[in-house]
Structure formats: C-alpha cells, structure tokens
C-alpha cells in the first residue's frame, strides 16, 4: 500500500486553528483597549474643557495606532499561514535522498 498525502481545506483550516484563534483574540483585545482609551479621552476632555479639535486629534491618534497594530497582527497571521502551507504541501518526487529511495524500494517490494 502506497502512503498518500492529501491537503484538504478542512485539514488546512484545522492546522491554522491555533493561529486563527490568536488572531481573533488579539483583534478583540485591540478593540477593547481602543474603547477604553477612547473612554479615557472623553473623560479627560470633559474634565479639562479641551477643544473639539484636540479631542478629534487624540481619537485619530488612538484609531491609527489601533489600526497599525491590527495590520501587524494580520500580517503575522498571513506569514504564519504561508509558513504552514509551505510545510504541509506534499513534496513527493522533489527530494530524492537515499532515505526516500530506500522507502520507495521497501514499498515496491511489498
């Protein structure tokens, strides 16, 4: 019996499950931190009588930093997915080392 390796979508998604969960948790964490920072900005703005332009600027900075961190998390997930994909795809016939030749010989004997 010749061993076969097949890459299915379900197997691929199961392999990326931990990375996907990390991505979801990191995005939820970023959103919670953003809402806390925006709440703090509003609280400070009310107590210090800040101008609307200063409040808008602070919110803009908070939004852009949260967006940048989210983009970094997405890029890291994409790199992990690409690395996982290249390590999972079968490489039959590409590596003709002596170990593979011995395995092929043993399979053909049966």
Image: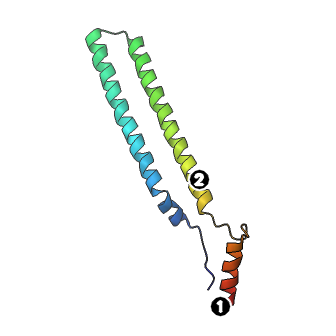
Q: Residue 64, percent across and down?
A: 48, 27
Does residue 25 appear to the left or right of 49 in the view shown?
right
State the residue position of label 1: 110
Q: Residue 66, percent across and down?
A: 44, 31
Out of 21 and 41, give the one closest to the viewer: 21
For the point 62% across and 63% down, which residue is it? 89
Looking at the figure, which quarter contains the C terminus?
bottom right
Quadrant of res 100: bottom right
Does residue 98 appear to the left or right of 82 in the view shown?
right
Between label 1 and label 2, give the one nearer the viewer: 1
For the point 63% across and 82% down, which residue is it? 2
In primary-sequence order, the first of circles 1 and 2 is 2
- Asked if the residue at tag 2 contacts the one at tag 1, i.e. Cβ–Cβ closer than 8 Å, the answer is no
In the current view of this chain or complex, which residue is farthest to the bottom? Answer: 110
State the residue position of label 2: 83
Does residue 108 appear to the left or right of 68 in the view shown?
right
Quadrant of res 103: bottom right
The Cα atoms of the two marked residues, 1 and 2, are separated by 35 Å
In the current view of this chain or complex, which residue is farthest to the front? Answer: 98
Element under disc 1: loop
Quadrant of res 32: top left
Q: Residue 69, percent across and down?
A: 47, 34
Q: Residue 9, percent across and down?
A: 55, 64
Q: Residues within 10 Å of mark 1 (few under 14, many from 20)?
A: few
For the point 53% across and 62% down, which residue is it? 12
- Vertical relation: 23 (above or below) 34: below
The way the protein has been coloured in the rendering is rainbow
């Amino acid at each position: 019996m010749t061993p076969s390796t097949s890459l299915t979508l379900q197997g691929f998604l199961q392999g990326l499950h931990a990375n996907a969960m990390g991505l979801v948790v990191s995005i939820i964490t970023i959103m919670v931190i953003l809402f806390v920072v925006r709440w703090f900005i509003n609280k400070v703005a009310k107590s210090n009588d800040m101008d609307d332009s200063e409040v808008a600027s602070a919110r803009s900075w908070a939004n852009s930093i949260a967006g940048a961190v989210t983009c970094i998390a997405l890029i890291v997930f994409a790199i992990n997915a690409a690395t996982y994909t290249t390590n999972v795809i079968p490489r039959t016939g590409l590596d003709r080392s002596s170990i593979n030749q011995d395995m092929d010989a043993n399979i053909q004997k049966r």
